[in-house]
Image: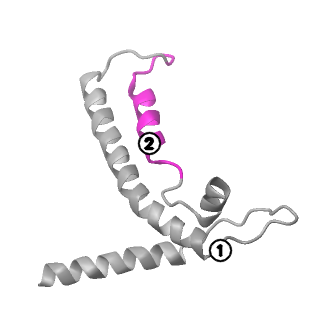
Amino acid sequence: MLKRAAAWVIDILLVLSMLLAPYPVQAQQAGSEEPGIINYAGSIVFSLFYIPVKLVTCVGTHVIADTAYIATYQVPGNYEGGTNGKEIGEVARGACSGSWVITPDQVKKDYQ
C-alpha cells in the first residue's frame, strides 16, 4: 500500500514539475500564436516517453564510456600526448546534454 501511494506521489510530482518548468522565451514572428492546450498536453505525453529514453541513453553511454576508458587506460590518443580519455569524456557528456523535456513550442512547430 505504501509503495502504491509513493508511486502516485512521484507521478503527480513529475507531472507538476513538467507543467511548472520554465520554458525559454524565444522571439516570435508576427502573426504566430501561443501554443494551445493541445500543445501542452502533447508536451506532457511526449515528455513522459522521452525522459526515460533519454535517461537510458545517458546511463548506457556512460557505462560504455567508462568501460572503454578503463580498457584503454594509458593508451596514447589523438591528442598531443594525451590519452583517449578526453574523447571518451566528450562522447559521454554529449549523450546527457540537451533538452530533457519536449516543450509545447516544439509540439506546435512539429505537428501543426
Q: Position of residue 41 (x, y in %)?
A: 52, 72
Disc 1 to disc 2, C-alpha distance: 31 Å
Towards the viewer: 83 or 40 = 40
Instruction: Look at the picture and state if 84 lies above or below 12.
Output: above
Q: Residue furthest right?
A: 30
Instruction: Look at the picture and state if 85 lies above or below 10.
Output: above
The magenta stretch spans residue 81: yes
Residue corresponding to mark 2: 95
Crowding at dot 2, Cα within 10 Å, few <14 / some 14-19 / many 20+, comes out as some
The magenta stretch spans residue 95: yes
Q: Position of residue 76 (x, y in %)?
A: 38, 15
How many labels were placed on the picture? 2
- Quadrant that contains the C terminus: bottom right
Query: Residue at image x 88%, y 64%?
Result: 30
* Residue 49 picture quarter: bottom left
Q: Position of residue 73 (x, y in %)?
A: 29, 23
* Residue 10 picture quarter: bottom left
* Residue 105 picture quarter: bottom right
Q: What secondary structure predominates along the stretch shown in magenta?
A: helix
Q: Which mark is residue 36?
A: 1
Identified by mark 1, the residue type is: Gly
Which stretch is magenta? Answer: 79-98
Residue at disc 2, secondary structure:
helix
* Lower sequence index among marks 1 and 2: 1
Q: Position of residue 2 (x, y in %)?
A: 14, 84
In front: mark 1 or mark 2?
1
Crowding at dot 1, Cα within 10 Å, few <14 / some 14-19 / many 20+, comes out as few
Q: Is residue 72 left or right of residue 2?
A: right
